[in-house]
Image (tube, rainbow, N blue to C red):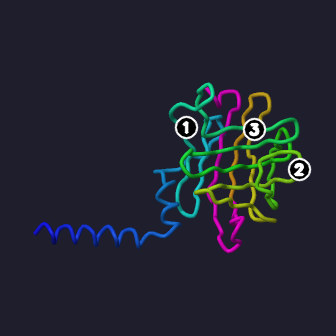
Amino acid sequence: MKKQTIKIYFLFITTLFLSCSENDNLVTTITEDVLPPITQTGANTFGCVINGAVFIPKDKTGYTPPGGGTPRGIEVLGNNSVFVIQARNYINTAIYIYIPEDIPKQTTYIFGESPGVSYGLNSPDYAHIFCIINNKKYLSFEDSGSILFSKVNQTSGLYAGVFTVKLKNKDDENDILEISEGRFDINIATLNN
């Protein structure tokens, strides 16, 4: 009886592993219960659906050298000429949204071809987005999607909107990733509190 139980268990595990594809692994590792609601109140939320799985950024847990601190799941980066939203779960997924203005306008930006960097000396002068999942980089391409900033209040630091995009794997153009139902509601003044 023990040998038969072990054989059945082994067969079950083997079948389970063989039936999983790489995209199945993606879905199971980033799936959450529900997206945050679309709001414009400075709730410091971000979420989207990546190839059918809900992604919500999470703060990193544990000690982070040097000096500790908790890296945040949502951050706004930039300098005097760019605005970058960075969302990560510190497991396998990171999304970077680049707007070539220090203060985004309350308008729709169309994503162009991404160089795969959030900002730097050779940053493009148009909006782009890229995503890293399981160490694979996916880049926006010309007219691959858009982001709407539905609320912008520079005085209070409130930025809210929605986005949708298709991305191509940097190393395999046939590997397309779809991000839908994207939403963010960020208050820079309270984001790190």
Q: Where 66 sits versus 17, above or below?
A: above
Q: Quadrant of residue 187?
A: top right
Q: Secondary structure at mark 1?
A: loop
Q: Residue at x 65, y 27 (%)?
A: 190
Which residue position holds label 1?
60
Q: Position of residue 89 (x, y in %)?
A: 56, 45
How many other residues sit within 10 Å of disc 3, few (<14), some (14-19) or many (≥20)? Answer: some
**Identity of the amino acid at label 3?**
Leu
Residue 26 vs residue 144: left or right? left
> Toward the viewer: 130 or 110?
130
Q: Main secondary structure of the magenta part?
A: strand
Tell me which amino acid carries mark 1.
Lys
- Real-space Cα distance between discs 2 and 3? 16 Å
x and y, in percent, of residue 63 in the image: 53, 31
| Residue topped by disc 2 | 122
Looking at the image, tell me whether mark 1 or mark 2 is earlier in sequence order.
1
Magenta region includes residue 52: no
Pointer 1: residues within 10 angstroms few (<14), some, or many (20+)? some
Lower position in the chain sequence, tag 2 or tag 3: 3
Cα distance in 3D space between marks 3 and 1: 17 Å
* On screen, residue 4 above or below 44: below
Q: Is residue 180 magenta?
A: yes
Q: Is residue 102 left or right of residue 151?
A: right
Check contact, mark 3 vs mark 1: CB within 8 A.
no
Q: Which residues are magenta?
A: 165-193
Nearer to us in this view, 146 or 24: 24
Q: Which mark is residue 77?
A: 3
Q: Amino acid at mark 2?
A: Asn
Viewer-side residue, 137 vs 179: 137
The image quarter containing residue 45 is top right
Where is residue 50 shown, x and y percent of the image? 59, 59
Occupied quadrant, residue 16: bottom left
